[in-house]
Image: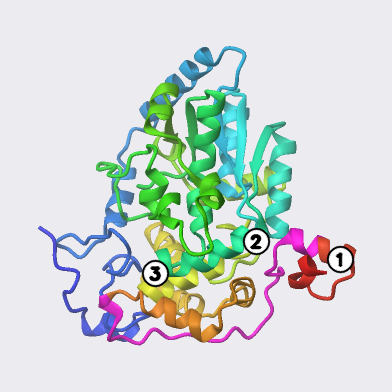
């Protein structure tokens, strides 16, 4: 029996909560506005329940299942690639590469959809991963002009800046899988880990052709056509047909469904063993999630403006579940980071041609009904980011052209 998400929060919660008036999980920092979340009769959220289930899973048995899947894939591959490893160079895909290559002796084909927003740290981490694990690699990078158009349309279409990335990370690996006839794709973190939309006992979101459309992209390439975006522009984001998927036998797994997933320990391991690098990430208090992208802070800021929470809420909720923070300490970190306007918003406004008022008008029009009558505070950032919030490639070009500002390097 579940309580309604509109159950009034306690007076004590209302006083200390990041956004007074919202209901939060009684155990962590997850609000009622997180997509797909539900609270049980005790007021505990789906993600907290999933973390309890995780402790009772027989991970030795799960790993045995994984080993069987891998051995069968290697046997079927013959002299070809054993699987596709979708890779960004981020903490998860770097760890995936370690597991597949060093632990199981696989020969994966590394496949990268580049969002064209790589940070300097992210660019290094991806290249480091390819070198350390001696990976063959295919990468697709959409034209910057197309990315800029999609970033503008994405705001109104799905409510954040990143449709091209949400869509591309799903479409490109599937395109490679069907064209090169490599059926197995191996991803990282399970949706049951911290997402709140599924649990380990009820994995409601199974990987299939439409997984990333359902999880993040929301709209297909065909649905994004219109205005100054043609079907030809959107062709690189088109998913293979169901028939192509069936003919190739494409399927995917998440390592986090078969091995005990601990992103904190895994990040420490790849940092200390292989030289993976963290960086400052806007809107977050940890330096490892989305380290590859300069626009992560803008993506998370749009979530905050629409739903009342950002990246710091996710991080704090995980840390509270793991016993690293109290819920009250988590709330304080949320207030400090989620509410801060990211510096990368300046770059986003530049590439889209939107004014700041237009940006806020677009995003606040999409605000959830639960937030319509509540104050969603925003604070100015009072310091420079440790890393420049301009794509690293543009920084390199500007440096060699002698352009004073990388944002004008393309026109120089």
Residues at circles 3 and 2 in contact by the CB criterion of under 8 Å: no
Q: Is residue 39 above or below residue 379?
A: above
Q: Characterize the local packing of mark 1: few (<14), some (14-19) or many (20 or more) Cα atoms within 10 angstroms.
A: some
Residue 310 position in % (x across, y down): 44, 69
Which residue position is annotated with label 1? 399
Q: Which residue is drawn at 54% across and 70% down?
A: 298
Q: In this view, does 15 lie above or below 411?
A: below
Which residues lie in the magenta part? Answer: 369-396
Name the front one of labels 3 and 2. Answer: 2
When asked about the image quadrant of residue 323, the answer is bottom left
Q: Earlier in the sequence, mark 1 or mark 2?
A: 2
Question: Could you tell me how far apart the alpha carbons at marks 3 and 2 are, in whole angstroms?
Answer: 45 Å
Going by the image, does 8 lie left or right of 402? left
- Quadrant containing the N terminus is bottom left
Name the front one of labels 1 and 2. Answer: 2
Going by the image, does 122 lie left or right of 300? right
């Amino acid at each position: 029996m579940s309580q309604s998400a509109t159950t009034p929060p306690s007076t004590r919660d209302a006083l200390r909560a990041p956004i007074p008036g919202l209901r939060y999980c009684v155990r962590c920092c997850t609000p009622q506005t997180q997509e797909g979340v539900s609270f049980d009769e005790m007021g505990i959220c789906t993600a907290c329940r999933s973390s309890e289930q995780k402790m009772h899973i027989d991970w030795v048995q799960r790993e045995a299942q994984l080993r069987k899947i891998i051995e069968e894939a290697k046997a079927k591959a013959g002299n070809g690639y054993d699987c596709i490893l979708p890779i960004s160079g981020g903490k998860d895909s770097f760890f995936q590469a370690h597991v597949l290559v060093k632990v199981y002796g696989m020969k994966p084909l590394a496949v990268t959809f580049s969002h064209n927003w790589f940070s300097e740290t992210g660019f290094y981490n991806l290249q480091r991963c390819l070198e350390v694990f001696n990976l063959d690699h295919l990468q697709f990078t959409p034209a910057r002009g197309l990315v800029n158009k999609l970033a503008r349309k994405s705001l109104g279409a799905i409510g954040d800046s990143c449709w091209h990335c949400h869509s591309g990370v799903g479409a490109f690996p599937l395109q490679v899988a069907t064209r090169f006839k490599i059926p197995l794709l191996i991803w990282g973190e399970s949706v049951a880990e911290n997402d709140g939309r599924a649990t380990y006992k009820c994995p409601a979101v199974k990987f299939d052709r439409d997984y990333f459309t359902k999880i993040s992209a929301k709209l297909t390439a065909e649905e994004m056509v219109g205005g100054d975006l043609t079907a030809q522009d959107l062709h690189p984001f088109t998913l293979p047909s169901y028939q192509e998927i069936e003919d190739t036998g494409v399927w995917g797994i998440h390592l986090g469904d078969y091995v005990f997933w601990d992103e904190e320990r895994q990040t420490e391991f790849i940092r200390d063993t292989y030289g993976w690098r963290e960086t400052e990430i806007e809107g977050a208090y940890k330096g490892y999630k989305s380290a590859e992208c300069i626009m992560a802070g803008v993506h998370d800021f749009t979530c905050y403006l629409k739903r009342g929470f950002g990246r710091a809420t996710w991080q704090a909720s995980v840390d509270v579940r793991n016993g690293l923070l109290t819920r009250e300490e988590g709330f304080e970190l949320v207030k400090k980071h989620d509410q801060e306007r990211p510096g990368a918003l300046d770059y986003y406004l530049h590439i889209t041609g939107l004014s700041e008022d237009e940006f806020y008008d677009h995003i606040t029009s999409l605000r959830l009904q639960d937030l319509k009558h509540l104050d969603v505070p925003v604070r100015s950032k009072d310091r420079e980011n440790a890393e420049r919030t301009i794509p690293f490639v543009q920084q390199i070009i500007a440096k060699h052209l002698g352009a004073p500002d990388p944002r004008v390097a393309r026109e120089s």
